Amino acid sequence: MGPFLSCSDVFRTLIRAAQRSMVLVALGAAWPVLGACRDDGPMAVTPPTGGPRISSLIASPASLNLQAGQQRSIDLIARDSTGQLVANPPIVWRSDAPATATVDASGGIRAVAPGIARITATSGSISALVQVAVSGAAPGIAQWRIARPGVSDVTILGLWDDGAGSSYAVGQGGIMLRSRANGPWEVISLNTTETLTGVWGSSPTDLWIVGAGGVLYHGDGVRFTPVSSGTTTTLLEVWGLAANDVFIAGDRGTILHFDGTAWSPQPTPVTEDLWGIWGANGTNVFVVGNNGVILRSNGTTWQRMTTPNGNPLFDVWGTSVGNVFAVGIFGTILRFDGVQWSTMPAPGRANLFAMRGRAFNDVYAVGNGGATYHFDGLTWRALSIGSGQNLRAIAPRGDGTLRLAGWWGTVVTLRGAAATATATTELSDPALLSVYGAGNSTMFAVGLGGAVYRRVGASWLQDAVPSVNDLYGISGNGPSDIVAVGDTGSVLRFDGSAWTRETAPTTGLLRAVWSGGGQHVIVGERGTILRSNGAGWSPQQSGTQQFLRGVWGTDPANVYAVGDGGTVLRFDGGRWQSLIVPSTNRLRAVWGTSANDVFVVGDSGTALRYDGVAWEKFTAPTTRDLRTLWGRGPTEVYAAGDSGTVLRFTGAGWQTLTTPARGFIYAMFGIPNSAGLALVGEGARIVEGQP
């Protein structure tokens, strides 16, 4: 017989209270506490004089799923009529199907062949039952490949095209991206970790790059060398009229000028941060910045101009001295007609960070949430580019197209003009936070910035969707009823052909969604639970304010939600109830094969299983946070999380798998119409495995 368990005084109090109230088995709410004590070691209990009389015998786990050839031991908890634990009672073990599973005198079970066996432990007239389901071998995933490596997930802050087929993008972490001769993008390191904020060149072989800490580089398109800027102030933008007439704007009113030989500071009448530069000629150069600052140079001095408001301005561009635009927060668009600045009506209130144009009636401004506004000479209109990423830079190209760039390494190419323009996402590597596959090979992954990727063949391509905030969860009832959820109440639904945005009765963060029986259940911050049967969303009372991070069910009347502080809720078709589990760690994912085989994982390697009677706490082979669960059956369950950790539960226990995954793994799901598995995570990296 396996070792009996030690328990704290609190444990004994719970057991006695539950016994008196007779709710242990009825609610399944107190028996899970037993699992919390299974690993505490032998119980030092002295049997009462004359020998104990057993009145209750509990086997844990109450059900097992094993592959033929595997072994596991059973723990027993014996109590007398007063509820006291009894050590070492005499036990007789028996299997009703030894050809399927055998049991030894110590409660060690060995799976022999596929089938069902009932193992009975008997002490006197009291018995405990363990059901053992034995299956054939489930080999699992053996081969892995990187299906989508990603290029870079840094935020791009500066973008420039040389007009001859090569583009340069700079951003966080000292990273520069380069596409030469219209080829693929590559990462170039400039041996700095400072944030790079701007790039501009007078020709394909004369480029300047600026950044934080006064960082300044000069290059010929291939090699870049550091140059002293004479300051440690953050430099925010670089732009010029010619190779010997280049300007830099930066923090605290900084303006530097290059005359072809050396950089020198220019006096300014302001101390605000200056973000954008553009000029029509040497005597008409404009700089914009915080607090609505606009400066104008006459070639000798900088003077502050009168502006309509004090909103921060991030970029400036024009076609002539009498046609200059400036953009900023809350959809601010200003226009200078050669005499004064005035406010223009904008099609939205997105913060705008960059603008460029190809003519006076073909001007573009970009900003948060994928906002792309176009001016046709009369009116500004919003364009849909199929990306919700925050955009920070824009550059016209020699072939007449435009490139837009922003968060998570996003680069979008815009072809055509105005409403007829088409957008193609070249790069975008946001963290992917959830993945779902339907039976007809439809498979999607969703992530930060409202990104949605679709698996097409063996490739993952970005899908055009309505602009929403970060997406954290996706699930479906099949290929024509898929729901993705995210921040600020974002809900998208896919009907088999297109994505549409739905209205949720909350603006909070929606973290996960489960679908089944034609219904969808969403969970999120502050105990939020929403349910839909296909027509709108209705809130449900969860009874908790804890952040709920995962949800799964066998059917709409048996759904589990997990979250912070060891929170586990169960919906029984009528209401949500809190369950007691042997962990107070943050729980991040729940998944199962049936009502009697439910797994939960969370922080610090937490791994739990519910067998229909009690919760069992495993000793997992990791202390990393586990963030996701999915499986193909009771003996092929996968968990994954931080530092590329991937585990598999075989029935006998958890084992560590070796994969090419690195960094955070946020979600996994089976690849439709195959025995494969897809893992998604940071940097939009996707790893796929096959048997």
Image (cartoon, helix red, strand yellow):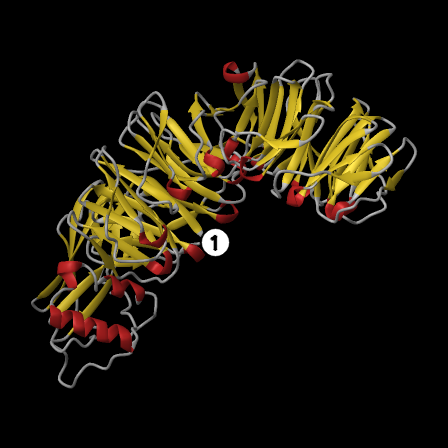
- Answer with left or right where residue 338 lies relative to residue 299: left
The x, y position of residue 154, in whole percent, is: 61, 39
Q: Which of 690 and 336 is in front in this view?
A: 336
The x, y position of residue 648, in whole percent, is: 39, 45
As drawn, the residue found furthest toward the front would be 339
The x, y position of residue 521, in whole percent, is: 27, 42
The C terminus appears in which quarter of the rendering?
top left
| Secondary structure of residue under mark 1 | loop
As drawn, the residue found furthest toward the left would be 125
Residue of label 1: 624
- Answer with left or right where residue 468 lies relative to residue 106: right
Q: Which of 549 and 32 is in front in this view?
A: 549
The residue that appears at 66% across and 18% down in the rendered structure is 182
The amino acid type, in three-letter code, at marker 1 is Arg
Report which quarter residue 249 is drawn in.
Answer: top right
Q: Which of 254 and 627 is in front in this view?
A: 254
- Answer with left or right where residue 406 lies relative to residue 143: right
Q: Can residue 648 be seen in this view?
A: no
